[in-house]
Image (cartoon, helix red, strand yellow):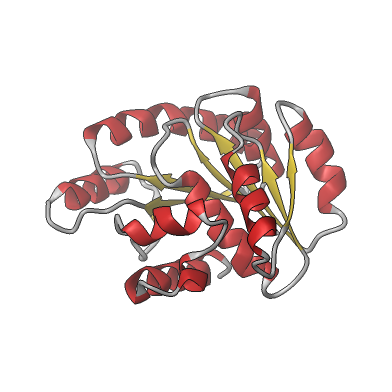
Amino acid sequence: MIYACVNTKGGVGKTTTAVHLAVKLAMRRKSLLIDGDPQASSASWAAWRREKDFSPSPTTTCLAGKAILSEGKQLAIHYEDVVVDAGGRDSVGLRSALLLADKIIIPIGASDLDAAAMTDLLEVVELARDYKPELDVRVLLTRVDVRNKDTSKMLEFLTEQKLRVFDTKICERVAFRRAIGEGATVQEIGKDQAATSEIEAFFLEAIA
């Protein structure tokens, strides 16, 4: 199965989502993590992970532009699961990730800016669906602040767009930033049970 975590907006937890999914998949079987974002945050995380000897680690590689689709297809043959971290802006790389993937996961915050960026991204997703009508697209609410009502407004917007949304919501937690900076997952850091539970629930939904 090939998963792509994509968004044209930064700061939504795209890389956090991708690396946590990749590790959870690697716990079950041979998995590949493709960093297709020019910022190469997933690749940095993977390097830190190797330094700290966390295990298991998905094999990690960087691809750019059209190579995400062409090289990604060839690499995927040798793995049972692949996770692509792509986006940050509408680009050839992002569009290639959409064409490579079986499942698209769109991490998104709950704000008007996120909604505006989502509208642009959906146009690109629909273009991809012209080539892959079976493409499974789901939205994951991330960096959720439970103290305000923005999440409800975003859910209303997503419902209007007729998008499938994960039941799981990933809240804004220090544990996620700390884990990424150490090349780890929140489960491996083990200091925030709520964060661990959220990732586990998300994973079970993602593979369903």
What residue do we see at 47% from left, 69% from top?
189
Tell me residue 160's x, y (percent): 28, 43
Q: Position of residue 60 (x, y in %)?
A: 73, 50
Q: Residue at x 65, y 29 (%)?
A: 93
| Residue 102 seen in the figure | no
- Residues 188 and 4: in front is 188
- Identified at 48% across, 45% down, the residue is 14
Residue at 39 percent across and 38 percent down: it is: 11
- Give the mark count: 0
Residue 107 visible? The answer is yes
Residue extending farthest top: 91
Which is nearer the eye, 154 or 19?
Answer: 19
Q: Quadrant of residue 42?
A: top right
Indicate the quadrant containing the C terminus: top left, top right, bottom left or bottom right: bottom right
Check the image and report above or below for 32 versus 122. below
| Left or right of 181 in this view: 57 | right
Question: Can you name the residue that lies furthest to the front here?
Answer: 51
Residue 184: image location, x then y, percent: 55, 62
Residue 144, position as x, y percentages in the image: 27, 53
Q: Split into 4 quadrants, where in the image is the N terminus?
A: bottom right
Is residue 146 left or right of 78 when viewed as pictured? left
Residue 161 vs residue 138, the one in the foreground: 138
Residue that lies at the very extreme toward the left in this rendered image: 148
